[in-house]
Image: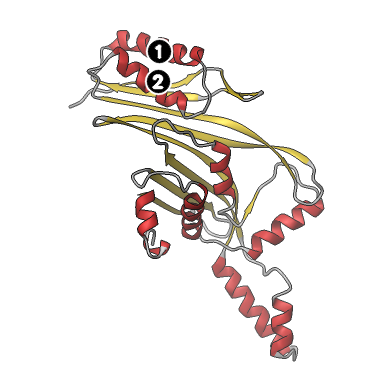
Amino acid sequence: MKEIFALHNLERLIEIKRDNSVIVLLPRIDIEISPTNGDNHMRLINSTLDEVIKKGIDFPDNICLKTVESILDAIPDIEHIKVRMEAEYVVFRKTPITQHETQEMFKILARAEKKGDRIVNLIGAEVTGITACPCAYEGILEKSRHNLKEKKFDDSDISTILNSVAIASHNQRNISILLIEVPRGENIDVEDIIEVLETSMSSRLYEVLKREDEVDVVYRAHLNPNFVEDTVRKILLNALDKFPELLDISNVFASSESLESIHQHNAMAECSTTFGELKRASNIKTIIQ
């Protein structure tokens, strides 16, 4: 039985320097290694993490990658090492209609792990948005069509009416995740990952909305209904489009969970694959059923 030594919820203040700006993070970091040497390894892990931070961080995923590399330099015979990081990340936005400035909070994720002779390094984000149910959408659409027929509207008028309005559905708060393997020597901007996730849902969310903004968000969400599996497929397709330079062997993980509004259960879909498999798929629906 392999013994694993782990430290959870380590917190450090980290400044990420970008051009002329500085991003401040207070991440929660988990580190596990095996085999272990108890207190000696605990002191080494803490001192190594502090040293990595002192040397400077330019991208969030480098926190995990550089920590793994530094610990392996100090203890070359470690068989297993994994570092995970989560942190709140602020993006400044303007609402769609009134252009009111808001601060939107997202969770950024990073992972680095020794697998065989290589280190797998992942960067990602968790984003909350809206999904509107396609099934209820179709049902309301047919019911509306039937009601208009009963009111003696002809087919042409019915089509014009239904194509001119957003059809109601029940909607959910959706939580989606995207994790992408970063090749050695390259970096991915976490804000690009956040953009991929938000554009894969029915609509993005805003912390503060005036009435005109609220109407726009709800209207657009119901023009773009998504099941959770639709959201995962869109995440994968949008990631392919956003990061065409990534290697075929690069791993990618996408998940989506809808917090249902009219059911006692939630809906969940996820997919773990590579960029090569995505590129070779003749139909993205074959990737996730």
- Residue 265 visible in the shown view: no
Question: Can you give x and y, in whole percent of width and height, for residue 17 in the image?
Answer: 59, 22
Q: Earlier in the sequence, mark 1 or mark 2?
A: 1
For label 2, the residue is 67
Residue 169 seen in render? yes
- The quarter of the image holding the C terminus is bottom left
Q: Which x, y percent locates residue 197?
A: 55, 48
Marks 1 and 2, how far apart in space? 7 Å
Coloring scheme used: secondary structure
* Nearer to the camera, 260 or 38: 38
On the picture, is 20 further left or further right than 71? right
Crowd tier of the residue under label 1, counting other residues whose Cα lies within 10 Å: few below 14, some 14–19, many 20 or above: some
Image marks 1 and 2: residues in contact by CB distance under 8 Å = yes
What number is the disc on residue 111?
none
> Can you give x and y, in whole percent of width and height, for residue 208 in the image?
75, 42
Question: Helix, strand, or loop for circle 1?
Answer: helix
Position of the N terminus by quadrant = top left
